[in-house]
Amino acid sequence: MKDKFGREIGYLRVAVTDRCNLRCLYCMPEEGVEFKPHPEILTYEEIERVIRAAVPLGITKIRLTGGEPLVRKDLPDFIKKIRSIPGIEEIALTTNGTFLPKYAYALKEAGLDRVNISLDSLKPERYKEMTRGGDLSKVLRGINLALDLGLKPVKLNVVVVKGFNDDEVLDFVAFVREKEVHVRFIEFMSIGESRTWKNRGYVENAQLRERISLKDQTLTALSAEEVSVLGNGPAEYYRVQGGLGTIGFISPVSNHFCSRCNRLRLTADGKLRPCLLSDRYVDIKTALRSGGSQKTLQDLIKKTIFSKPEEKEIDQTKPEDEIGPDTAFMSQIGG
Ligand code: SAM
Ligand code: SF4
């Protein structure tokens, strides 16, 4: 279904939990955010109802995210259920990767198509610091397993934070030379927890690209066909000479891609959000829990699609006190 501005909405991101086993500096405070009590979180059955209602409206692609989706029990069983819904063409997962060594086989067997893995540093000590305790070796094992099992294309999300990991950009370029992974440098956004994080600072992707080009003269943009294999998302992709993988740039701050945005988000506590960078949402949980019909759910989904703003409404570059009332945490919206 098209929104008011002619964008075809075909993609639903579902945060299956707001909990996480890590505490990335920019995403969650050390003590954790106040997690929603279990009854507030949608059950798998409720999420499935939303997806079933969304498919006839044109949703064909589902991404499971969180918090950390792999901390929610029985995720493979849930994937099996949504795999069986006619009209679902792709199921993807965004994960911090630490539980992939444990669950990758079950996820693949359940029908998961592919994974995006978040990895902000290739240095064990720094990774541990940025995630407050994460173990890099588990993520690296998870990446290898995802490749071996064909959960491809395997994409790596690297949030670049000034003064923290921007010195590792060339290490990531070296990484894609050796492995068939698609590293996407994501501009750090000042929202949720990161609004109050004093060390925040983003590096414009154009600067990173220049820095890489200086070292690697052979950075070439992928053709439209090659990009479509990787999914027509917000990233701009480049090949590095001799690389098995590619590098990409996602620039929500310096060069937002609202005109191409095709997605909706369902938060773990049952809010449909038309835009990551807007406070707008439509409550769908009340309808789910008060006997709302499929038609009622579809009306709410349509309402969300129609409320999708033409452009982002939160300017992440503004200082904290100028951004306005609080926006939800990334771990609640799902990134
Ligand atoms: N726990 C999973 C993970 O880390 O991949 C899924 C949820 S996480 C909220 C989804 C994505 O949002 C991750 O790639 C994370 O790095 C990114 N993210 C979180 N806070 C961010 C911020 N302030 N700016 C940019 N990306 C952010
Ligand atoms: Fe957890 Fe992902 Fe947030 Fe890190 S970015 S704290 S892994 S939800």
Image (cartoon, rainbow, N blue to C red):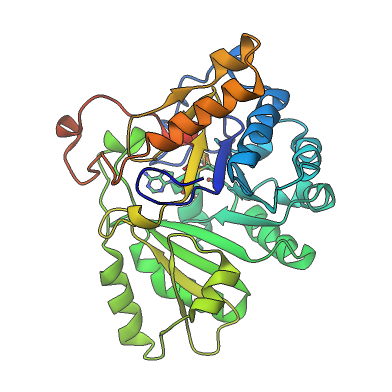
Which quarter of the figure has residue 25? top left
141 or 214: nearer the viewer: 214
129 or 274: nearer the viewer: 274
Apparent side of residue 109 relative to residue 132 in the rendered image (left or right)? right
Q: Residue at x 78, y 33 (%)?
A: 74
Which quarter of the figure has residue 202? bottom left
* Badge count: 0
Q: Residue at x 55, y 47 (%)?
A: 11
Q: Is residue 227 above or below residue 85?
A: below
Q: Residue at x 62, y 17 (%)?
A: 288
Q: Is residue 18 visible?
A: no
Apparent side of residue 307 relative to residue 158 in the rendered image (left or right)? left
Q: Is residue 201 above or below residue 213?
A: above
Q: Position of residue 163 (x, y in %)?
A: 29, 57
Q: Is residue 35 above or below residue 105?
A: above
Q: Is residue 61 visible?
A: yes
Which quarter of the figure has residue 45? top right
308 or 20: nearer the viewer: 308
Q: Is residue 34 above or below residue 331?
A: above
Q: Position of residue 16 (x, y in %)?
A: 62, 32
Q: Position of residue 250 (x, y in %)?
A: 39, 61
Q: Residue at x 63, y 30 (%)?
A: 50
Q: Position of residue 172 (x, y in %)?
A: 48, 71
